[in-house]
Image: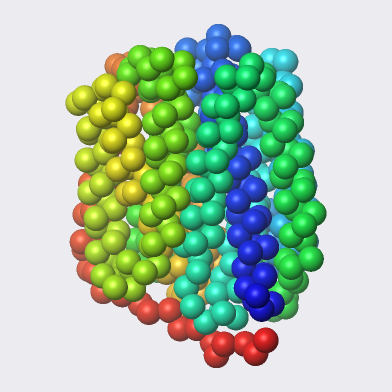
Amino acid sequence: MNYLSKRRVAVGAMFFFVGLCFSTWASRIPDIQTKFGLSEGQLGTLLLFLPIGSVIGLPIAGWAVHRFGSRAVILTGGVAYALTLPLIGLSPSTWILLPVLVCYGMLGNVMNISMNTQGLGLEDQMGKSILASFHGLWSLAGFTGAGLGGALILLGLSPAQHFGVVSVISLLIIFFSKGLIVKEEKSSEGSGLVLKKPDALLLRVSLIAFLGMMSEGCMFDWSGVYFKKVVLADPELVALGYVAFMGAMASGRFVTDKLAARYTKVAVIQVSGFLIFVGLMLSVIFPTVWAATAGFLLVGLGVASIIPLSYGIAGRSKLYSPSVALALVSTISFFGFLLGPPLIGFVAELFDLKTSFALVAMCGMGILVLSSFRKKVFLIPPKFPKKAAV
């Protein structure tokens, strides 16, 4: 294995650990709701604070990556992210949990921007598209985290104990990967804090990413609750829908680059939007264990390509540097996480969870419409620099 391949493994490992931490939190949301006796509306309000932290983390990440480089941010932020996870389980009240979730969301987005910056740089060095595979590892970690969560729940571990186990695993991953996370050359452009107005291409890509992130947020935060309260699944099957979603999303991301190269980015995005719509409507119309599981699997396949293709297109913008373009798309798209989960809770409070999921299904139709309009903006081929010598 050559040096660049080793670097790819190390960067992929960091994506994996962040996905593992996030899915670990998501897998215990029903337990958090039970612990504090929260209604759907109250849970929706609670979940609002994590994406608020994510949005707060965007300018911090931009400044930190510009000032210190992505390596320092990845390693420092990674340790902080891993150590914050157990604090969620240890929080004795919602008043303590709220600032912890803000911090957790902030650190998560700091890791998101710094890891994707590192990934885009490695793409340039390797001379081929690999970003989707990193997102695939993030999703695979989500699948792993959901499975591990189900096993530890059966063993009777509390959320705090569960989170502590994952925290230790995460710190080990960081330790063994740190030597191959490199410090890139500092950019001389801007302060790392200024976000420019997006052009037509980035705005369209950002809106598609926004709808994709809203769909993801729905599945991350509410799939377990949906199976518990609407599908009425047995306790050991509550995580089944989430596992199906994460498994499909992980698998889809590993083939996204090849599919986009063969059928074009716009075709992949169009099919993705259609799958999101069909999958969510299937789970709403037929709220049984197997129909909802199949529906969540289709949603996973649908959202698989949205964020990797959006980030990849943004990183090849002809008008903006990769870091600025990535921050622009991330800023807009992460409002999907900001609005999606609490919106589901509020609508469920007024109507029910089935109505909430039907509303989110419209995100898939929105993606289909946006990707069908002025297709040429998505057909920009990546221009990689000459492959670096190893």
Please state if 312 lies on the left or on the right of 372 as rendered. Answer: right
- At 67% from the left and 20% from the top, the residue drawn is 157
- At 24% from the left and 57% from the top, the residue drawn is 270
- Say whether residue 221 is visible: yes
Closest to the observer, 332 or 20: 20
Residue 257 % position (x, y): 40, 67
- At 68% from the left and 45% from the top, the residue drawn is 107
- Say whether residue 359 is visible: no
How many discs appear?
0
Q: How is the image coloured?
A: rainbow
Residue 216 % position (x, y): 42, 42
Residue 33 % position (x, y): 54, 16
Closest to the observer, 341 or 27: 27
Q: Is residue 344 above or below residue 113?
A: above
Residue 27 % position (x, y): 54, 29
Q: Quadrant of the N terminus?
A: bottom right
Q: Is residue 76 above or below residue 228?
A: below
- At 39% from the left and 37% from the top, the residue drawn is 244
Please state if 286 lies on the left or on the right of 112 as rendered. Answer: left
Q: Quadrant of the C terminus?
A: bottom right
Q: Is residue 57 above or below residue 40?
A: below
Residue 198 falls in image quadrant? bottom left
Q: Is residue 93 above or below residue 182?
A: above
